Image (tube, rainbow, N blue to C red):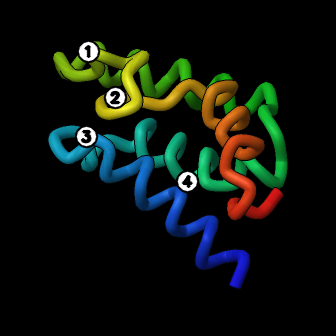
Amino acid sequence: MKWIRALGLAGALVASGLSEVDAQGAVQAYQRALAQVCQRQVTPELVRLYQEALKEMDASGSGYGRDSNFHGLRDPYLAYNDCFQAPSIPR
């Protein structure tokens, strides 16, 4: 049951405006890693994946509004903070 919740969080993050860049590898790798942020916390590897995904989005002309909840990549520290503001998400 916990994995369903984690998949729901990952699905919401992916559906948050990444449709035009969903074929890009660094973005997908970051989204896969971000789905585990509530269990693993923010790691140096997650931060590195985030920075690579940002570079990839900037190169493609996407990624504007990256600090928004509704478009772009979610900062790993903000995503981890969401784990505590949404008690139904497994930690």
Residue 7: assigned label: none
- Seen at 69% across and 85% down, the residue is 1
Pointers 2 and 1 in contact (CB under 8 A)? yes
Pointers 3 and 2 in contact (CB under 8 A)? yes
Using the rendered view, name the quadrant where residue 36 is placed.
bottom right
Q: Earlier in the sequence, mark 1 or mark 3?
A: 3
Q: Position of residue 3 (x, y in %)?
A: 67, 76
Q: Which residue is mark 2?
A: 72
Q: Which residue is mark 4?
A: 32
Q: Is residue 4 left or right of residue 22?
A: right
Q: Earlier in the sequence, mark 3 or mark 4?
A: 3
Q: Looking at the image, is 17 positioned above or below residue 64?
A: below
Q: Looking at the image, is 21 positioned above or below residue 77?
A: below
Q: Position of residue 9 (x, y in %)?
A: 53, 58
Image quarter in which the C terminus is found: bottom right
- Seen at 72% across and 76% down, the residue is 2
Q: Nearer the viewer, mark 4 or mark 2?
A: 2
For the residues labelled 3 and 4, the Cα–Cα distance comes to 16 Å
Residue 17: assigned label: 3
Q: Secondary structure at mark 1?
A: loop
- Seen at 65% across and 39% down, the residue is 82
Q: Earlier in the sequence, mark 2 or mark 1?
A: 1
Q: Which residue is mark 1?
A: 64
Q: Nearer the viewer, mark 1 or mark 4?
A: 1
Amino acid of disc 4? Arg
Q: Looking at the image, is 17 positioned above or below residue 55?
A: below
Q: Earlier in the sequence, mark 1 or mark 4?
A: 4
